[in-house]
Structure formats: C-alpha cells, structure tokens
Amino acid sequence: MTTHSATLREEIEEMIAVGALKPGQHLDETELAARFGVSRTPIRETLIQLASMGLVVIRPRRGAIVAELGPQQLVEMFEMMSELEATCGRLAARRMTREEQQALLAAHQDCMQAMESAEPDVYYYKNELFHEAIYAGSHNQFLIEQTRALYRRLRPYRRLQLRVRDRLSNSYREHDGVVQAIIEGDGERAAQLLREHVMIQGQRFSDLMASLPQLQLFAA
C-alpha cells in the first residue's frame, strides 16, 4: 500500500469514526474523488480496503455504503473486544518495560486533563492513546493487530459512548484501576478491570442504543 493510498484510507476511516459518513450512508465514488482531489480508481481501491475491515459494505451493482451494526452484532463485537483488551492487559502487567509504564501513566494523565475539560471528543482521542499503550505493552504483535482491527471497527460506537452522561468521569476512574493493576504486575486484576471497562451490558447498552441517532449529528 502506498503512503498516499494509506492516507486516503485513514481519512475516510476517520470520517466514518466521527460520523461525517453515517452508518447506512451511500458512498458516492465521484463525490469522494472530488473531495480528496483524486480519480475514482484510488477511491474504489480504498473502499475495497475498508470493506475488508468491515467498515464498508460493497453491494453488487448498487455501490458501497457505510456498514451498520445491529444490536446483537454490536453486543457480540463489544464482548469480543472486551476479551481482547483483557488479554492485552494481562500480558502488559507481566511484560511492560519501565519506559512503557511511564508512557501509560502519561496517557492516563492526558485523559484526566481531557476529562476535566469536559470535552468528549478530546477525551476520545486521548483514550485511544491510553488503550494503544496497553496494547503495545502486551508485546504480542498478532494480538495487537487483531485488537486494533476490532477497535477500528467499533470506533464510532466507542466514541458515542463517551457522550453519555457521566461516562467521561466513570471511564477515567476505570482507567485508574487498570493502571494500578498493570503497574503492580497484577495481570488477572488488570484483565478483569479491562473486561468490565469495555463490555457493554445492562444500562450501558440501553444508553448506547438510545444514543445511536446522535451518530447522524457528529460533525467532521
């Protein structure tokens, strides 16, 4: 993949993540080509790449749309995400270097500042770096790749969760327990806390379902 095509994929992926391209929206190749100043060929290739990631659905003779997740599929994917992150946390507690622990603490501090600013979108990006620090600390490249792939698939929904009332403060408090467990080398506790942090069920699921229409209100 060339640097240009990778950048194009990342930009369209980001538009999907922030809701500028909404679930179920038709993706017009001509419009996207004009937006990015390229021909339709790289746009078509990018949509194929995004389809392989599950972010886009390409329908024969009808073009591509942004993928939609039904409630059951969403629960199943968050369930899998929680297990992948739990495994990352367990391994990170055993394998993180001192430098990686410092990077995790710095990411945690950045999350605190974003929480205090009460800006869900700022917190979202800092939160992403926090989780990325844990993935890296697992020192298992295959696990990292699989976890990142599912994280990307769930980005619009993880971002949306942070707009629910009190979620920023609750998320940060959950992070605090995860950080302590990892620094103390308690892999099982880190895994359990991350599993609970990521999994959506009960009221959290109800809140997410009620908030889904907001995906159509996100700005780029």
Image: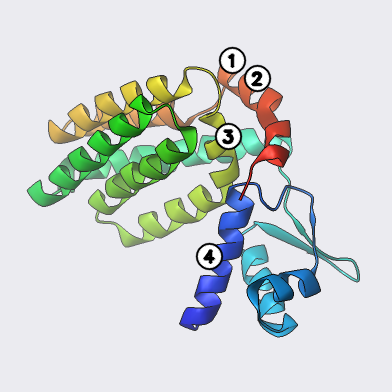
Q: Dot 4, crowdedness within 10 Å: few (<14), some or many (≥20)?
A: some
Q: CA distance from mark 2 to mark 3?
A: 13 Å
Q: Amino acid at mark 1?
A: Gln
Secondary structure under badge 1?
Answer: helix
Q: Nearer the viewer, residue 118 or 83?
A: 118
Q: Residues within 10 Å of mark 1 (few under 14, many from 20)?
A: few
Q: Nearer the viewer, residue 44 or 11?
A: 11
Q: Is residue 3 left or right of residue 135?
A: right
| Circle 2 residue | 206
* C-alpha span from label 3 to label 1: 15 Å
Location of residue 207 in the rendering, given as x and y in whole percent from the top left corner: 62, 20
Q: Are marks 2 and 4 in contact (CB under 8 Å)?
A: no
The numbered mark, 2 or 4, whose residue comes first in the sequence reads: 4
Upstream in the sequence, badge 2 or badge 3? 3
Mark 2 closeness class: few <14, some 14–19, many ≥20 residues within 10 Å: few
Residue 35, quarter of the rendered image: bottom right
Closest to the observer, 115 or 70: 115
Q: How far apart are the two marked residues, 1 and 4, measured between alpha carbons? A: 33 Å
Secondary element at tag 2: helix
Q: Position of residue 140 (x, y in %)?
A: 29, 57
Q: Report how far apart the C-alphas of labels 1 and 2 lie in the structure.
A: 5 Å
Look at the image and tell me whether residue 83 can be seen: no
Query: Amino acid under label 3?
Result: Leu
Location of mark 4 (residue):
10
Circle nearer the viewer, 3 or 1: 3
Front: mark 1 or 4: 4
Residue marked by disc 1: 203
- Given the image, on which type of amino acid does mark 2 rest? Ser
Q: Residue at x 62, y 70 (%)?
A: 49
Toward the viewer: 188 or 57?
Answer: 57
Asked whether disc 1 touches disc 2, contact meaning CB atoms under 8 Å apart, the reply is yes
**What's the distance in space between the residues labelled 2 and 4, CA to CA?**
30 Å
